[in-house]
Amino acid sequence: MNALEEGTELTIDFGKLRSIGRNDQNVVPVALQDADSNEVLFVAFANDRALRETLATRRAVLWSTSRDELWRKGDGSGDVLDLVEVRVNCEQNSLLYRVRPRAAGACHTSDANGQSRRSCYYRKLSAEESGPSKLEFDEKPR
Amino acid sequence: MNALEEGTELTIDFGKLRSIGRNDQNVVPVALQDADSNEVLFVAFANDRALRETLATRRAVLWSTSRDELWRKGDGSGDVLDLVEVRVNCEQNSLLYRVRPRAAGACHTSDANGQSRRSCYYRKLSAEESGPSKLEFDEKPR
């Protein structure tokens, strides 16, 4: 079991953005949203090349900041996200890809039935008053 | 007029994440979503302190990476975002704040009626086949 992905301990990785900065990657965060259910699927990164290919091919293309290469979502898993529209925020430093999942899922992790999870936000933080937060699995809310 | 915010030219700021990295800030991206309409409001950043205060005070608290200080959303504008729940992604390197806007808006920009815009994603990229993308104002879709 991958404890980070399937555990109930909150162990946030605060280092990812620092490594993006150190590697001088020209990327912006992208929120990916199911255009039908409006569920938020995940947050990833795009550079100019990924954005252009997204618009040209009408499917979600990101930039993998860990592999430093184009990430055509779904090429390996089949979980292609067809593009509905791209939106940009007020300050033009983030993007919103509104997409339609071609298969059932969008996350690289699998649920108890072995299906790709629909969204990467399948755990919520418990609302305990004090102490470290625990995670609860909860795949229903959109 | 602020052309970046009110114009129709796409001029994405790819430098923000690099400056976060250079300044060694321990933050993760946060997607903020209206828990009732499921509209994505904006993407911001949080560190451990902002997350703890969000959970303790039950309203959205972020980390301002430009001012390098806690950003209690709505303290100046009144556009407080009451917290419904916090979710974390599979790899624990981003957060989803599901919130309920206390006032009408969530964006620091204003619409033609002088009201804070509900979401920062009030412009979409045109679907032209080639050439640089133009932006269209479109505040309706959620």
Image (cartoon, coloured by chain):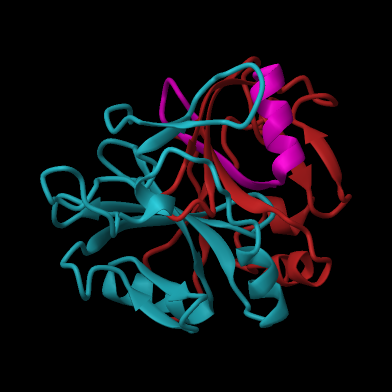
Chain colours: A cyan, B red
Query: Based on the displayed image, in which of its 4 quarters is residue A62 positioned?
Result: bottom left
Seen from this angle, which residue lies furthest left?
A113
Horizontal arrangement in the rendering, residue B96 relative to residue B79 (left or right): left
Residue A8 image position (x, y, % from top left): 43, 38
Let me know if residue B90 is in the magenta part.
no
**First to last magenta residue range:** B34-59
Q: Quadrant of the C terminus of chain B?
A: top left
Looking at the image, which residue is at 84% across and 66% down? B23
Horizontal arrangement in the rendering, residue A77 relative to residue B97 (left or right): left
Looking at the image, which residue is at 73% across and 65% down? B16
- Image height check: is B23 above or below B48? below
Query: Does residue B113 appear in this view?
Result: no
Horizontal arrangement in the rendering, residue B45 relative to residue B83 (left or right): right
Residue B122 image position (x, y, % from top left): 54, 43
B26 and A95: which is toward the camera: B26
Query: Based on the displayed image, in which of its 4 quarters is residue B74 positioned?
Result: top right
- Image height check: is B126 above or below A75? above
Query: Does residue B21 appear in this view?
Result: yes
Let me know if residue B48 is in the magenta part.
yes
Looking at the image, which residue is at 83% across and 38% down? B70
Residue B68 image position (x, y, % from top left): 87, 50
